[in-house]
């Protein structure tokens, strides 16, 4: 019942996310004390999504090891449910939301960091933690996609799920503004209502695009691996 390298790697990634979350929550920032706390930030929500996802991955690996050779149909049925949940979470949440957070954060940061991550935050958040929240998400999720095949849901149900998440978060951001009079992200203060609507619409479209990108990438990686070299067919 030996662990293979990819299973050990998932445990390490899960522990790293737990460490990042604990360190982030330990920071006493004024924004954490206001309405919505950390849950108004997509970065924090994404960290929770990634931690839960890799937790399910580790649980699936352990269940697979325990089920192997047992011959129990009930255990195999429960394992299939875990694998289905793992695959759904990667397709609908972990990949599109994770890539969105990394891409949008660094694009806006490169343009004007004060619009999304003011220099004042350097006094609270160390550089390694910033990269843990906004950089390592990308290689971690790509490693997972590369080491395990994931069955995507039907395209219509997958897109419906990511749209529901996107619209739900946008409504949450608007509600926080309604209650507090402050936008969660500084750059939203500097653009007009029309530009905000355009931005929110664009983010939903981008989330849908990232879902499709994950579907294509997953198919490319695993279809390529399963396809025999051309010389074998001759």
Image: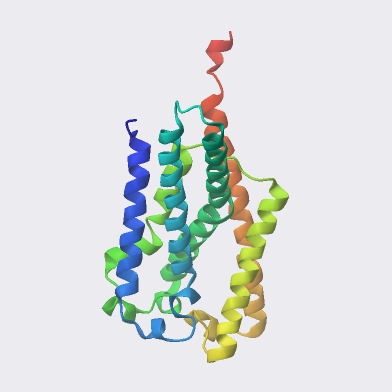
Looking at the image, what colour scheme do you see?
rainbow
Residue 131, can we see it? no
Spot occupied by residue 81 in the image (x, y as percentages of width and height) = 57, 43
Q: Is residue 105 left or right of residue 177?
A: left
Quadrant in the picture for the N terminus: top left
Spot occupied by residue 90 in the image (x, y as percentages of width and height) = 53, 50
The residue shown at (38%, 79%) is 118
The residue shown at (46%, 42%) is 60
Q: Is residue 163 left or right of residue 122?
A: right
- Which residue is at the front of the view, 73 or 46? 73
Quadrant in the picture for the C terminus: top right
Residue 105, can we see it? yes
- Which residue is at the front of the view, 226 or 64? 64
The residue shown at (41%, 45%) is 58
- Which residue is at the front of the view, 182 or 2? 2
The residue shown at (51%, 54%) is 94
Spot occupied by residue 78 in the image (x, y as percentages of width and height) = 54, 41
Q: How many numbered tags mark residues here?
A: 0
192 shown above or below 97:
below
Q: Residue furthest top?
A: 234
Spot occupied by residue 213 in the image (x, y as percentages of width and height) = 59, 48
Q: Is residue 183 left or right of residue 205?
A: left
């Amino acid at each position: 019942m030996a662990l293979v390298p990819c299973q050990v790697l998932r445990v390490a990634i899960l522990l790293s996310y737990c460490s990042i979350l604990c360190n982030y929550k330990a920071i006493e920032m004024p924004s954490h004390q206001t309405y919505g706390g950390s849950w108004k930030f997509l970065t924090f929500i994404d960290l929770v999504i990634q931690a839960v996802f890799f937790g399910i991955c580790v649980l699936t690996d352990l269940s697979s090891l325990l089920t192997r050779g047992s011959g129990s149909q009930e255990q195999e049925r429960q394992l299939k449910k875990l694998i289905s949940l793992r695959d759904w979470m990667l397709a609908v949440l972990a990949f599109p939301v994770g890539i969105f957070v990394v891409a949008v954060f660094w694009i806006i940061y490169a343009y004007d960091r004060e619009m999304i991550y003011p220099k004042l935050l350097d006094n609270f958040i160390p550089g390694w933690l910033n990269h843990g929240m906004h950089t390592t998400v990308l290689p971690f999720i790509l490693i997972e996609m590369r080491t395990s095949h994931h069955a995507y849901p039907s395209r219509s149900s997958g897109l419906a799920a990511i749209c529901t998440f996107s619209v739900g978060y946008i409504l949450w951001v608007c509600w926080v503004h309604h209650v507090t009079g402050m936008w969660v992200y500084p750059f939203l203060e500097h653009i007009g209502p029309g530009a905000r609507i355009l931005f929110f619409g664009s983010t939903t479209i981008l989330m849908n695009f990232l879902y499709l990108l994950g579907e294509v990438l997953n198919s490319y990686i695993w279809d390529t691996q399963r396809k025999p070299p051309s010389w074998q067919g001759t």
